[in-house]
Image: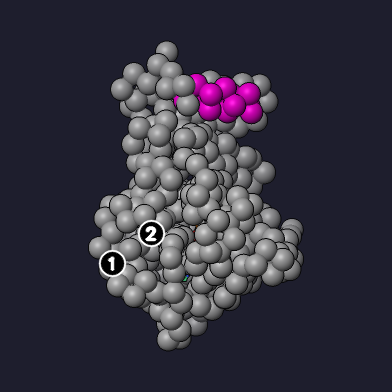
Amino acid sequence: MSAERIVIVGGGPAGQAAAAAYRDAGGDGSVAILAREPDPPYERPPLTKDFLRGESGREALPLVDAAWYQEHGVDLRTDAEVAEVDLGRADVWTVGGEAVAFDRLLLATGADPIVPPIPGADGPAVQTVRRIGDSERLGEIGAGDAVLVVGSGFIGCEAAASLAMRGAAVTIASLEEAPQAKRLGPEVAAEIAGWLEGLGVEILPEAELDSIRPAGDRSARARFADGEERVADRILLALGVERNDGLAAAIGLPVEDGVQVGPTMESADPRLLAAGDVAFAFNTTAGRRLRVEHWGEALNMGEIAGKTMAGKEAAWDVAPGFWSVIGVHTLKFVGWGDGHDESRFEPGEEGAFACWYGKAGELVGVVSHLDDAAYERGRDLIEERAPWS
Ligand SMILES: Cc1cc2nc3c(=O)[nH]c(=O)nc-3n(C[C@H](O)[C@H](O)[C@H](O)COP(=O)(O)OP(=O)(O)OC[C@H]3O[C@@H](n4cnc5c(N)ncnc54)[C@H](O)[C@@H]3O)c2cc1C
């Protein structure tokens, strides 16, 4: 057994899962997690769901209780942003000027919301949502306040639904004709649109944000490329994320859609690993690298990295899956997530449905609502690389 120094940059699910798996696999080296945020690793999914609706509180968010870190010999340092990796000296430097030496370094730095380079995007009534504080700020929106959500991906749809359930007057601007039409197909997009409209959310289709200007003391006026305008008390930008891959790029690791790593989460330099949203990891069953931004996969990839660092065999071979809760409706998706060229929508009873996706003659994904059997069967078939039929 080695007495290696394990340093994990990033206090999200991938980083926490890696530390836990390293210890569970018998790793007896020192483990430090250097985390930029003030809070210990916590659940992000509730930030646009029950936490935003006020149905759960801060106490439900931590991934593990505070004592876990000490009990497992994990040195968690919050408010510790890593500014630089020095490969020659094999240490990392925090913004505060502290050096931490490593034998193996896991980059689990995740991703941050995209803020488009348009006028007014940094205005006081404009925000994104990634952290607890962002969700708390959104939660200040009162009943009757006007909210504009820009972007109709899962984060945008979830936030729009939750804010409408809190009584806000919500408009969601989508680049598409209906939310997620390209990703999930027209039938599923129509279902999502129906759920949002059922909560009173106005959908602005094919709306490309052009600029934002102040409107009065605390409101903002958004202007779209077609000239349409909306005034809102709060504008939530939900335009996707960009990977925090700057540290990796600075030390010359290949960065394309994320830090390129193999199925063990190791990069070409075995001292350096990456896992979670920041990684562009090779999935052995898919036979290619996949870009994923899913909670469960951050945990999976972190666990694999932890086992790898402890000298155990582990490889990423499962079909990635995620879920989304839009109001009271849960969608579950499993698949490779890198596009489809055909789809088949199967409506069920009482609003249930499944939609199957194929690409180049192979089944590559399934999304289900109230149909877990389709989700489970889909996972098996996708992992078998079953033909499209
Ligand atoms: C509001 C919201 C709802 C979501 N809902 C779902 C859902 O329902 N289902 C689902 O599957 N997924 C969901 N996701 C996505 C999921 O949360 C992410 O895929 C997951 O958090 C990725 O984990 P990670 O550990 O890779 O990165 P992160 O969770 O982003 O954690 C990375 C951490 O590293 C820190 N960091 C970055 N750079 C540095 C540095 N230089 N030094 C130190 N620390 C650094 C960051 O501040 C961050 O705390 C949601 C995300 C959000 C924001």
The range drawn in magenta is 371-382
Q: Nearer the viewer, residue 374 or 18?
A: 18
What residue would you read off at disc 1?
251
Pointer 2 residue Cβ closer than 8 Å to ligand 1 = no
User: Could you tell whether 140 is left or right of 271 in the image?
Assistant: right
| Amino acid type of the residue that numbered disc 1 sits on in the rendered structure | Ile
- Could you say where residue 266 lies in the image, as x and y percent from the top left? 39, 51
What residue would you read off at disc 2?
272
User: Could you tell whether 235 is left or right of 228 in the image?
Assistant: right
Colour scheme: one colour
- Could you say where residue 154 lies in the image, as x and y percent from the top left? 50, 48
Other residues around mark 1 within 10 Å, as few (<14) / some (14–19) / many (≥20): few
| Amino acid type of the residue that numbered disc 2 sits on in the rendered structure | Leu
Helix, strand, or loop for circle 2?
strand
Q: Earlier in the sequence, mark 2 or mark 1?
A: 1
- Judged by its main secondary structure, the magenta piece is helix
Query: CA separation, marks 2 and 1?
Result: 10 Å
Other residues around mark 2 within 10 Å, as few (<14) / some (14–19) / many (≥20): many
Quick check: is 370 in the magenta stretch?
no
Residue most toward the top? 389
Closest to the camera, between mark 2 and mark 1, is 2
Q: Nearer the viewer, residue 110 or 204?
A: 110
Please say if the residues under marks 2 and 1 sit with CB atoms less than 8 Å apart.
yes
Task: Report the residue at 25% width, 63% height from top.
Answer: 252
- Could you say where residue 124 lies in the image, as x and y percent from the top left? 46, 78
